[in-house]
Amino acid sequence: MTVLLIILTVDLIMAYKRPHIPSTRESALWVGFYVSLALIFALMMFLLGDVEQAGQFIAGWVTEYSLSIDNLFVFVIIMGRFSVPRKYQQEVLMVGILIALILRGIFILLGAQLIENFSFIFYIFGAFLLYTAIRQVFENHDSMQETESGIIRFLRKHINISPTFDGGKVRTVIDGKKVFTPILVVFVALGLTDLVFAIDSIPAIFGITTDPFIVFTANIFALMGLRQLYFLLGDLIDKLEYLHYGIAFVLGFIGVKLFFHALHINELPFINGGENVLWAPEISTWASLIVILVSMAISVVASLVKMNHDKKRELADLSIG
């Protein structure tokens, strides 16, 4: 755990000390490095633990990584809406990742305590994930940003904010007075986004494993390399049109799995007389992993196929014109 936090800290410090626009090759190497680390960690869990723990980590990591990629959609919108200079987007993303790590750590601790003391929490987690899956299908990321606009307007109205950026500084001096830069507003927008995704992602991974160590490490590995992935995907991330359907299916699947698990360990007196519902199936970790991987693969491939089809159609229209 300590080694993971050190690696993540070094990566974030490097982004702060050397702000630049990473090349595609640099970003790809870093993303590949972090993915390799996650797979090595899974192998170590298999060797030092058992195949079930390794499977829970991989399934949890893939789920959290998928949700983190969805998070990047909103990051793209935020960066574009506030016209953050691309050179300083690394620093902004660094802060966003730190906020996400802190919020997820808090939610993991709270979730672990709730699960330990209240078994019926699985019903609540399951219902919430099903609601989130439906919202994921019918709502777009722009509508999520609209819900934040009230807080952003409040900040601009009550805090003296400069009209332009001053590098990556949060505060600057204009006419001898210290004022905040638009970076503050961006940080608030990122924080609100991270809060929403933390609330969504933690119940999802608790549907795969209730081991706090696996939950936390899966989240760390999902966040590691997220900054580089942002620059690697670039404009492509906004063109993965069907990705959110794949994520919605995964969330819905885990929601159903949580309901089955809640029934299996049921203690609520108004359900089956407070007895366990023995017919409720327990979906295995490996079955969950297969469903998650297949769902995400189908949504990504379908998005790429549509993108290629649209590109060919555009070229055909141009040739006709």
Image: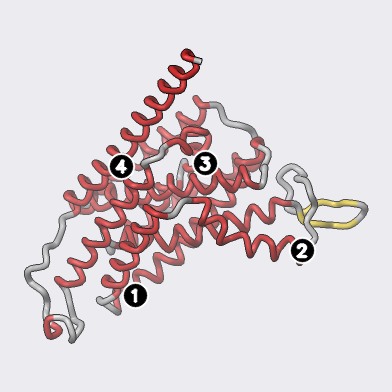
Residue 114: mark: 1
Q: Nearer the viewer, residue 136 or 232?
A: 136
Q: CA distance from mark 2 to mark 3?
A: 29 Å
As shown in the figure, which amino acid type bears the numbered disc 1? Leu
Specify whether 255 is left or right of 181.
Answer: left
Q: Is residue 56 above or below residue 195?
A: above
Sequence-wise first label, 2 or 4 = 2
Residue type indicated by callout 2: Ile
Could you tell which of marks 1 and 4 lies nearer the N-terminus?
1
Res 61 visible = no
Which x, y percent locates residue 273? 12, 85
How packed mark 4 is, by other alpha carbons closer than 10 Å (few <14, some 14-19, many 20 or more), is many
Q: Earlier in the sequence, mark 3 or mark 4?
A: 3
- Reading the chain from its start, which is encountered first: label 1 or label 2? 1
Could you tell me if the residues under marks 2 and 3 are in contact, i.e. CB atoms within 8 Å? Answer: no
Reply above or below: 222 against 241. below
Q: Residues within 10 Å of mark 3 (few under 14, many from 20)?
A: many
Q: Earlier in the sequence, mark 2 or mark 3?
A: 2
Question: Residue pushed farthest left?
Answer: 279
Q: Which residue is mark 2?
A: 159
Question: Please, what is the three-letter code of the amino acid marked with disc 4?
Answer: Met
Name the element at disc 1: helix
Q: Nearer the viewer, mark 2 or mark 3?
A: 2
Q: Secondary structure at mark 2?
A: loop
Question: What distance separates the C-alpha of mark 1 from that of mark 2?
Answer: 38 Å
Q: What residue is shown with label 3? A: 227
Q: Which mark is residue 296?
A: 4
**What residue is shown at x 32% (from left), y 58% (from top)?**
205
